[in-house]
Amino acid sequence: MKDELSEETLVQAPASAVWSAYRGLELGRLTDKLLGHVVGKVEVIEGDGGVGTIVKLTFPGTSGGYMKEIFRIMDDEKRVKETEMIEGGYIDLGFDVYRIRLEIIEKDAESTVIRSTVKYEFDDTKTELASLVTVKPLQTMAEEIGKYVSEKKYDA
């Protein structure tokens, strides 16, 4: 089964500044700083933030849970970043494919829409997996990073 789930978050900051926060490895650094207690710790396993970079997110608490993802798309012109989970997390739960697509869309000079999309695939016999998919952590991340960029006048 293939499907996707998407959410749009409006933030009061220029698209160029929001993209600077989302592109490459900066998103991991900001996630650690702003949401480490909620989302977990991000560490770079391989790469410089471009396509092919692999990062590991270790979830907070004592569960030992983690996920590794690889950067598949990093498009500065379209302001699109796409990652694919390659180990742990949803893959360990039985998903065949789990991708996250982040699009930074300019609304006007001072506001931006962050579209967060999860694309996933799993065996048709495992329909219960669909109920596990959520964009809530991505929405929370968009809200917090949007606030941070807006308040800090983040450099584009």
Image: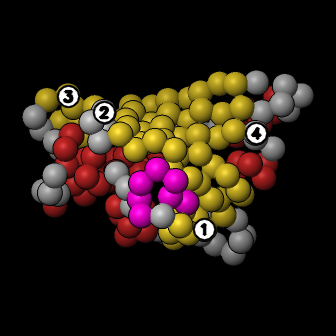
N-terminal label among 4 and 1: 1
The residue under the point 46% across, 50% down is: 51
Query: Residue 58 bears which disc, if any?
Result: 1
Q: Mark 3 sits on what residue?
A: 107
Q: Mark 2 sits on what residue?
A: 78
- Residue type, numbered disc 1: Thr
The residue under the point 22% across, 54% down is: 149
Q: Which residue of the protein is positioned furthest toward the bottom in this rendering? A: 62
Mark 1: which secondary structure?
strand
Please report the bounds of the magenta region as a residue range. Answer: 48-54
> Which dot, 2 or 3, sits closer to the camera?
2
Q: Residues within 10 Å of mark 1 (few under 14, many from 20)?
A: many
N-terminal label among 1 and 2: 1
Q: Mark 4 sits on what residue?
A: 96
N-terminal label among 4 and 2: 2
Could you say which quadrant of the image residue 49 lies in? bottom left
Res. 104 visible in picture:
no
Q: Residues within 10 Å of mark 4 (few under 14, many from 20)?
A: some
**10 sits left or right of 56 in the view:** left
Task: Provide residue 114's location: percent of width, then percent of height.
Answer: 34, 37
Q: Residues within 10 Å of mark 3 (few under 14, many from 20)?
A: some
Q: Residues within 10 Å of mark 2 (few under 14, many from 20)?
A: few
The answer for how far apart the CA atoms under marks 4 and 2 are is 27 Å
> Does residue 3 show up magenta in the picture?
no
Res. 92 visible in picture:
yes
Quadrant of the snapshot with the N terminus: top right
- Residue type, numbered disc 4: Asp
- Residue type, numbered disc 2: Lys
Task: Provide residue 123's location: percent of width, then percent of height.
Answer: 83, 31
Mark 2: which secondary structure?
loop
